[in-house]
Amino acid sequence: MDRISFYDQIESNKRNSWILVFVVLVTLAFLSITISAVLGAAYDWSVMFLFFIFSTVFNIAYLLVTYYKSADIALSSVGAYPAEGQKFQQLNNVVEEMVIAGGIPKPKVYVMPSPDINAFATGRDPEHSVVCVTEGALQKLDRNELQGVIAHELTHVRNYDIRFVTLVAVMVGLVSILSQLFLRSMWYGGLHGRGGDREGRGGGLMVVLLLAGLVLSIVAPLIVKLVQLAISRKREYMADAGGVELTRYPEGLASALEKIRDSYKTGARTQVNSAVAPLFIADPVKDRFLAIFQTHPPIDERIKALRNM
């Protein structure tokens, strides 16, 4: 099979990002219409209209704010601070070397207060990107290992993975919010008991809408979450390969991943919001139950792939 060029990957990610925006809007519109119809059948059709207008405005506002403020939100959630001063000179030097190799603008550089070895990139495009590493990474990785980690994260930036992952996260968040809104209104607002009271206004329709809304509200968040995790796992392999292309030294990143693996066996991981977990070079959340809920491929498999390059 022919290898896909990095330029093809960039164009694919840009195209898929806009396709995803369309899917987001269709999914949210369908969920909003279903919930609105339930409210209309249960109460009054004017309620349906008002809720649909509210949800549409809310969805658009949430999408725009989250998209344009994604980097700030991620940095704030982990308590990161700017990598400034002589103390972080080596880190900034490594970032500058890798952005020159990758032909992209230098991102803002931040440090996360954590003893773990980890890092992540975020933002909406290379011109508005951020790379963040943990204090543990700076203390425990040598220069070659740090270079491999930074190259991996800058590949996410270079390939527009950060935009794609941000949009997927927005979809997961919005679907979850609307689903929770419906479920809470159903159980705490008395919707489940109104089907029999509205027979004159379509009790059978009410039951069908309630069932459709219930199933959709439960299944939709799970489906989009699994899509998010699958996308995240696939892109880690791509970023590993891209990091090697920038450094020309697979062992640097392989060795860094070994240190991450070994540290996870002996110590507790720093707790982070599950929404930002897919951004990291290694999953900061411990012991997920099933493989399909993993944000990253197994570290041993990634190390093996790197050493086969």
Image (cartoon, helix red, strand yellow):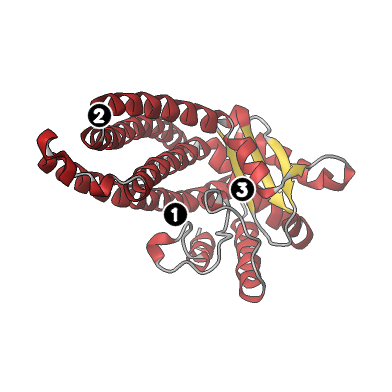
Circle 1: element type: helix
* Numbered tag placed on residue 44 in the rendering: 2
197 or 155: nearer the viewer: 197
Residue 125's place in the image compared with 152, above or below, is: above
Q: Is residue 7 left or right of residue 40?
A: right
Q: Residue furthest right?
A: 86
Residue 55's place in the image compared with 91, above or below, is: above
First reached walking from the N terminus: tag 1 or tag 3: 3
* Numbered tag placed on residue 288 in the rendering: none
Residue 42 in picture, x, y percent from top left: 24, 37
Evaluate whether residue 101 shows in this view.
no
Evaluate whether residue 164 shows in this view.
yes
First reached walking from the N terminus: tag 2 or tag 1: 2
On the image, numbered disc 1 is attached to which residue?
233
Residue type, numbered disc 2: Asp
Residue 121 in picture, x, y percent from top left: 60, 43
Neighbours of disc 1 within 10 Å: few (<14), some (14-19), many (20+): some
Q: Is residue 18 left or right of residue 245?
A: left
Residue displayed at 56% across by 62% down:
285
Residue displayed at 54% across by 42% down:
156
